[in-house]
Image (spheres, rainbow, N blue to C red):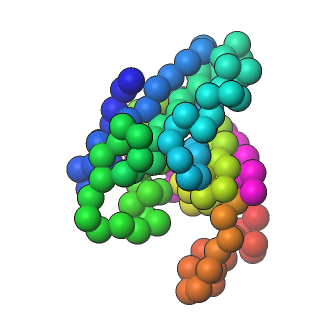
């Protein structure tokens, strides 16, 4: 297991497998173990990077929570890998992948069943127009 420190000082744990273009797998609920059945299929072609969300698994946490902190965590992992990764997110991980791609250079984004945008954030994000 490796760690990276997010801008607010939170330690984000991640593991890597395989060799090749970095592929960062972002889970929604649960922990990085969500990807255990799938990750081995990518090992031959990618360096698979699987982080735990803050407050889950082996990652740290802080009292103040926001989507922005979650996105900063993803960006910290992106900065820790060599090259421009592919972000692959499921559910809330899909939303984090989309938002992180707004801030970081990535080669592609795959958002599988991304979380629904609600409230003021729906207007602020304006994802439909940008896509």
- Residue occupying image coordinates x 58% and y 44%: 26
- Residue occupying image coordinates x 36% and y 26%: 2
**Up/down of 69 relative to 73, above or below:** below
- Residue occupying image coordinates x 65% and y 47%: 89
Q: In which quarter of the image is the C terminus?
A: bottom right
Residue 113, position as x, y percentages in the image: 75, 57
Residue 91, position as x, y percentages in the image: 66, 56
- Give the left or right position of residue 60, taking residue 126 as reference: left
Residues rendered magenta in the picture: 103-113
Residue 10, position as x, y percentages in the image: 28, 49
- Pick the residue in front: 31 or 123: 31
- Residue occupying image coordinates x 29% and y 68%: 64
Residue 46, position as x, y percentages in the image: 65, 21
**Magenta span has 45?**
no
* Residue 101 visible at all: no
**Up/down of 127 relative to 44, above or below:** below
Q: In which quarter of the image is the N terminus?
A: top left
């Amino acid at each position: 297991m490796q760690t990276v420190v997010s801008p607010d000082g939170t330690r984000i744990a991640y593991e890597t497998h395989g060799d090749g273009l970095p592929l960062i797998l972002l889970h929604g609920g649960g922990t990085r173990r969500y990807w255990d059945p799938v990750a081995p299929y990518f090992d031959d072609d990618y360096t698979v990077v699987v982080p735990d969300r803050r407050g889950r698994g082996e990652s740290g946490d802080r009292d103040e929570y926001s989507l922005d902190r979650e996105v900063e965590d993803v960006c910290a992992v992106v900065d820790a890998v060599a090259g421009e990764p592919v972000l692959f997110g499921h559910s809330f991980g899909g939303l984090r992948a989309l938002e992180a791609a707004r801030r970081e250079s990535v080669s592609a984004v795959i958002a599988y069943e991304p979380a629904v945008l609600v409230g003021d954030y729906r207007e602020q994000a304006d994802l439909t127009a940008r896509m």
